Image: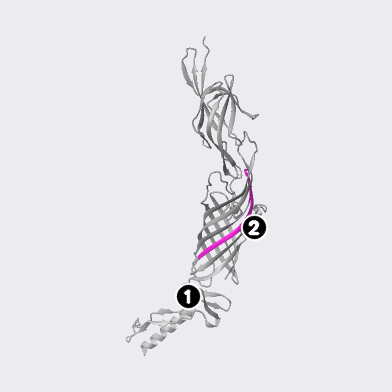
Amino acid sequence: MRRVLGIVIVLVAALSAYADEPVDTLVAKQDTLQVLVGDSAGVMVLADTIVEVDAPAVKQDTVEEKGNILTGQYERLKDGTRIYADTVIYQGMNLKLDLATTILEAAISKGNILSFEAAWNIRLKQRYYPTLEGGYVNAKASADGGVQESEGGFIRVGLDINGLKKHPERLNAAMVGIRIGTGLTNYDLLGVELNDSYWGKGKKVDFMNQFRADCWGEVVAGCQVQVWEGFQMGWYVRFKILFTRTAKDGQVMPYYIPGFGYRDETNWGVNYYIGYKF
Amino acid sequence: MVLGLVACEPDRTCRQDTEVEATVVLKCYHFDTLDVAKTEETWDSITVQGVGSDSVLYQNRKGVKHVYLPLREDTTVTAFRMTWQGKTETLYIRHDNTQRFVSMACGCVIYHQIEQVWTDKVWADSVTILNTGVEAAEQDNICIYATKRDEKL
């Protein structure tokens, strides 16, 4: 009798402890408890049997729906929040629109560069964010040697890792990651100077209907913060390294590369995103 | 900081040497009044002008060891009038041209491959090609051989 009473007391204490835990530990559907019981002499020992306890994920009156998305079990609270266990692989996706590049590039170039960029990522195990980014750029970029008029697109793929502690409800993330990007450019180079100062003073040439694909890598750091009802915002800083630095003999290269910026061995970039979590 | 990162762009002004010229050197056998020869590799005075151009490249320049000649990009034969010791020689250079894009700041340069050289043989005994490639890296391309004799007393 004392043995049974001991088990009951420990179980009640364990369940009470679970009830006081933050929600992120409540999502465990089933936990295994080893129970201490008092023996006939009143000494506490480990129980002979393992007791399995179904721990409630959340208070039942707050749960509106249970289900799975692709691979993951989730529970939807009445406020719309989906809660995943950290063992669930797929935990939602985010679609984001970049404002910084669009506004700053247009402002700094006085309207000569129009750039639009969007990003999509998915949340895996509350830690990993495979990411796809893409955009379109229409640029008129000039230097002493000529003017480039171009339009093109770019794609970057990569992976971010969230450095914050895993949490099923809190979707904020502080991330570092890598990208590999490619930019495709259709361009004209106009008024390119021929350095023939003796014979052809001031002579210029045009290169029309040129096409080039460039490739680069990036190291990124940034964050993603939930602001209201699935809406989020965040920023990234990017350090870019151009891989395609040379051209075949005589081939011209674009001065401005979509998604990379002005042609140089390295470059920096900044994004400010607004997005929505699905 | 954000503006600085996004505005990051390379230099709009070209800061590299874009002159591409053929380098001509002289090898002159100078016989003195006793007919003793010594080799000279410096023009004591030289005037050079491109045929078809109003500009003079070298005007009675003293102590010149190398003469740098810009080749035409719009044709495959470039000629230069070279006045030395009061006589005018014409140097002809046949070459092909390759346009190379350097950068948006620097524009294009024209590289050449020298195929043939010859002169009117007024004061030059002969002319040879040392290196066919006329590119950014400076190297001796053409050698003119000449003879100079001091008048005997």
Give the secondary structure at mark 2: helix
The answer to whether residue B144 shows anywhere in this view is no
Amino acid type at circle 1 is Thr
Question: On the rendered structure, is A144 left or right of B31?
Answer: right
Q: Earlier in the sequence, mark 2 or mark 1?
A: 1
Task: Tell me the residue at 54%/61% (across/down).
Answer: A222
Give the secondary structure at mark 1: helix
Q: Does the magenta stretch mainly form a helix, a strand or a loop?
A: strand
Can you tell which mark lies on residue A25? 1
Find the magenta span and give its range: A129-149
Task: Tell me the residue at 41%/85% (across/down).
Answer: A9
Q: Residues within 10 Å of mark 2 (few under 14, many from 20)?
A: some
Looking at this view, name the residue that lies furthest to the left.
Answer: A41
Can you tell which mark lies on residue A97? none
In the rendered view, tell whether residue B34 sits above or below residue A4. Answer: above
Quadrant of res B6: bottom right
Image x and y of residue A52, in percent: 41, 82
The foreground one among B76 and A17 is B76
Residue A146 on the magenta span: yes
In the rendered view, tell whether residue A169 sits above or below residue B133. Answer: below
Residue A13 on the magenta span: no
Amino acid type at circle 2 is Ile
Q: Which residue bears the numbered disc 2?
A: A103
Rendered-image quadrant of the N terminus of chain B: bottom right
Label 2 to label 1: alpha-carbon separation: 42 Å
